[in-house]
Image (cartoon, rainbow, N blue to C red):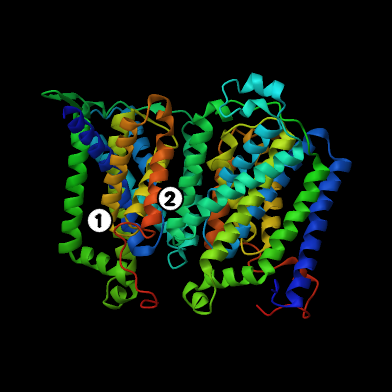
Amino acid sequence: MDYIVQQTLNALSFGAEYALIALGLAIVFSIMNLVNFAHGEVIAIGGYTMMVMATLAFKNPIIIILGAVLAAIIMALFLERIAFRPVRYADATTGLLTAFGVSLILQNLFLLLVSPRPIAVTSMYFLDWPIRLGPIQISSLQIFETLATLIAILLLVLFLKKSLLGIAMRAASLDFEMVRLMGIRANRVIAAAFAISGLLAGIAAIFIIARRGAVDPTLGFNPVLKAFVACVVGGFGSLPGAVLGGFLLGALEVGMLVLLPQSYGGMKDAFVFAIIAIILVWRPEGILSPPKEKGDKI
Amino acid sequence: MRIFQSIRSFKNAVWGASLLSILVAGIGLLVIVFGEKYHLRLVYAAYVNLLVVLGLQVFMGNTNITNLSHSAFMGLGAYVAAICVTPVTIKKLSLPDAPWGLNTFELDAFSSAIISLTITGFLAFLTGLIIVRLSGIGATIVTIAILVIVHSVFMHRTDIFKGKQAFFGIPQVFDLYSIIIISIGVIFVARFFRESKWGIQLRASSDDDTSASAMGVNIFNLRLFAWTLGGLILAMAGICYAYFLGTISARPFYFSHVFLTLAMLILGGMRSITGAVLGTIMITFGLEWVRFMETGPVLIGIKFPEMLGLSGITLGAVIVLIMVLRNGGLVGNFEIEQMFLKGRNVPKV
């Protein structure tokens, strides 16, 4: 019983991280059909900002956290302006390949300008201490991560339901032209989507750094790959789908770690992805795919 | 059953493929005659990449679905052929714990290649069954999943694939002449597929799947066919890779190679074979120069700094610039024979 509770908590914190990243991908995709592969590099920018601020002798962790999140938001907005605006109305393949190119450029810029090797960033270690709840041992980081994700989801839902910009964003995911005809600037809606995705990436960066304690050029690449899989399995472009997919992926991953024998531990990803592929055979558009009306929207 | 819509498209395909073959063979022969020994290796690798790009084009160019698993299929082709063809004496050393008696037999190069094509083709068919059911973006993400799955199997089943270490002792079967001939063959296959009625139907369905299926195009079957054909070409590329280099390891069959060949395809233009060939040639020559700059050379009296990562930045920049400025690639739908057949035999674009 304790073991099950323990592993459930592990699965929740894994899932929270994927959900956080997947939400950032889904919100951009739902509005401009862009599969943002460069999201991982936005996370990496957050990590590198922490590294730079720590070496500049910023002691206060709150300032470092704010700086990292701010840097991620600025980076996301910057990428939208210079790389993704020119392909805004192009088809999804063009956007996807552009994002791939951007990701490749940024990864190699980190490699060229900073270092190909991991650099230690210890300023987030204070988030991580062991907690004993009776027989269950968890890390405070897991609690923070799950809580932060839940709060982020809650705030995002409030924003999307209550604020004018949020309502415009939800409308834009159905019919962007109509939103523009209502007098809302396209640039503002898209910038808001990128800012939110940057914010979520920044939060994710904090937790990734707190767990790994080091930053390297591919910091965000693998988590984002997983988050993409989460998005697809949940239903691409659907925000609840992204969250569901993230937690499902977390559960699968922990399940694999528990069930697979030690010698197969390295093949965890292979098994997880294979299960995802089987789910997709069952539901090709993802579990919570947004309803599609062919020929309705041009 | 007719394969081609008209005699004209057949003629165009033959013309175009022949012209590209002359170009491709010409470059290879020039290197054989004038090049030094280390050039041969570089050019051979370029031909392997050309095969990969063509294999990629068959699916991606005709369906407009981004495929990122191509290096995995190339790796499968390479490993299966390598495991079959390597002599037992070497396999006893390198794969002492191989299961299923993999280290107790050896085959000749031809049967190994056939087995490799069969197994990789079958795996491509199986994965294709999933891919063709998904719409564009979902399909792309699943291709990434395939790449990750295959790569982690390569890395962690060290008893079969040696993982990070090199799988060595593969006899050298091919030389530059063999791969030139194979490339020409593959250029013809890819071009014939593009001009065949299936290729035309596929491209129509990638432009507008609703109307294409309303006209009776069976999109699933066609995509599955293109995916499997692409997989076979990629397996061939892997076989050529293993049959020349003598050692293979899992590392080259991952993201960096995926990006490299993807950049080659989209630089030239993924909808045409001419574009695929042109992009491969341009990136191959361009990258040699960039890699030279990367090492920090002294040029006209100026010492350049060492710039690790410059080739990655270049590839990324090529992809972004092409997508932003000219998203059909340099040549778009253009095929090489249109230069020579002006006005005649050329369908109006």
- Of all chains, the one bearing label 1 is A
Q: Tell me where residue B113 appears, x and y as whole percent.
A: 71, 42
Task: Give coordinates of residue A36: x percent, y percent.
Answer: 41, 53
- Amino acid identity at mark 1: Pro
Question: Quick one: B55 or A175, which is closer to the camera?
Answer: B55
Identity of the amino acid at label 2? Phe
Quarter placement of the C terminus of chain B: bottom right
Point 38% across, 45% down: residue: A275
Q: Residue B250, position in %: x, y?
A: 57, 34
Numbered disc 1: secondary structure: helix
Q: CA distance from mark 1 to mark 2?
A: 20 Å
Residue at image x 68%, y 29%? B105
- Residue A152 got which mark? none
Chain letter of the residue beneath label 2 in the structure image: A
Density class for disc 2 (Cα within 10 Å; few <14, some 14-19, many ≥20) is many
Residue B157 falls left or right of residue B299: left
